[in-house]
Amino acid sequence: MTVRVQTEDFDVGFEVNQLRNARRDTGAIVSFVGQVRDLNDGDTVTQLTLEHYPGMTEKALEAIAQQAKTRWDFFDALIIHRIGSLKPTDQIVLVAVSGAHRGEAFKACEFIMDFLKTEAPFWKKEVTQDGEHWLEAKQSDDDARERWVK
Amino acid sequence: MKIKIFYFARLKETLKFSTEDLELPDDAFAQALTILKLKAFLAKRSDVWQQMLLGKLKVRGAINHELVDDNAPIVDGDEVAFFPPVTGG
């Protein structure tokens, strides 16, 4: 289980290959990449700033990955989340899960993303043509998380 | 008792505070301190504090890097944080 919070970009191909080559009994890698959109709620976004809570962020992400591990049978999980100043089409987050078969890896990857969205202490601030503002948390993200706790 | 408090995102920006060390007399109030009681205590500082901590904005609390609810007890030496609902990913 690896968690990285960083300002630098990441190379999805490289990271996925690391997971692929780690074990010869790996049959599936599921990866999710989130990126900055140039349009949000009708506004043109020129910049996105990501703030976080150093110390808690890493701990929260590790706890989420560990929780996923208790629910599904997969080999390894990698979470990379960027912080600082980003532009449209920049990558924000990578979650990659390796396992023997795709089923458990798909579920674990989605679970990790849904909990990351609702429990990991990151906050986005957008710069648009009308100035800058903090993004509001979405009910749909809470709903996505709730599916797993029923 | 001594605690450390961190503020993030909109709270940090509006309150113009990112962190503070708070010392409270070891009385009955401090011994029964919770997230909600600390919010109410800080809210007395000014209208802005009142609006940010007890207003329309949902404020989440963490103690020693763990998300907690309003009734969570705070003890001497704790690191407390207040922030809006998270929006990463």
Image (cartoon, rainbow, N blue to C red):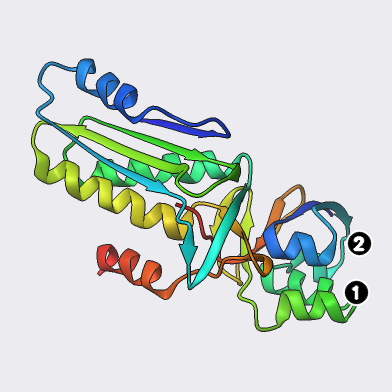
Indicate the amino acid at tag 2. Pro
Is A20 positioned to the left or the right of B79 in the image? left
Is A1 positioned to the left or the right of A5 in the image? left
Query: Dot 1: what SS?
Result: loop
| Precedes in sequence: disc 1 or disc 2 | 2
Residue B45 is tagged as 1
- Res. A3 image quadrant: top left
Q: Chain of mark 2?
A: B
Image coordinates of residue A133 in percent, x first then y, are 66, 66
Residue A66 higher or lower than B87, as above or below: above
Image coordinates of residue B46 in percent, x first then y, are 90, 78
Residue A96 higher or lower than A64, as above or below: above
Residue A42 higher or lower than B65, as above or below: below
Closer to the observer: label 1 or label 2? Answer: 1
Q: Nearer the viewer, residue A47 or B34?
A: A47
The residue sitting at 10% across, 40% down in the picture is: A102
Tag 2 residue: B25
Image coordinates of residue A145 in percent, x first then y, are 34, 64
Q: Where the N terminus of chain B falls, by quadrant? A: bottom right
The residue sitting at 56% across, 66% down in the picture is: B85
> Label 1 crowding class (10 Å Cα cut-off): few <14, some 14-19, many 20+?
few
The CA span between labels 1 and 2 is: 17 Å
Residue A46 is tagged as none
Q: Chain of mark 1?
A: B
Indicate the amino acid at tag 1. Arg
The residue sitting at 73% across, 69% down in the picture is: B32
- Res. A103 image quadrant: top left
Is A94 positioned to the left or the right of B15 in the image? left
Query: Dot 2: what SS?
Result: loop
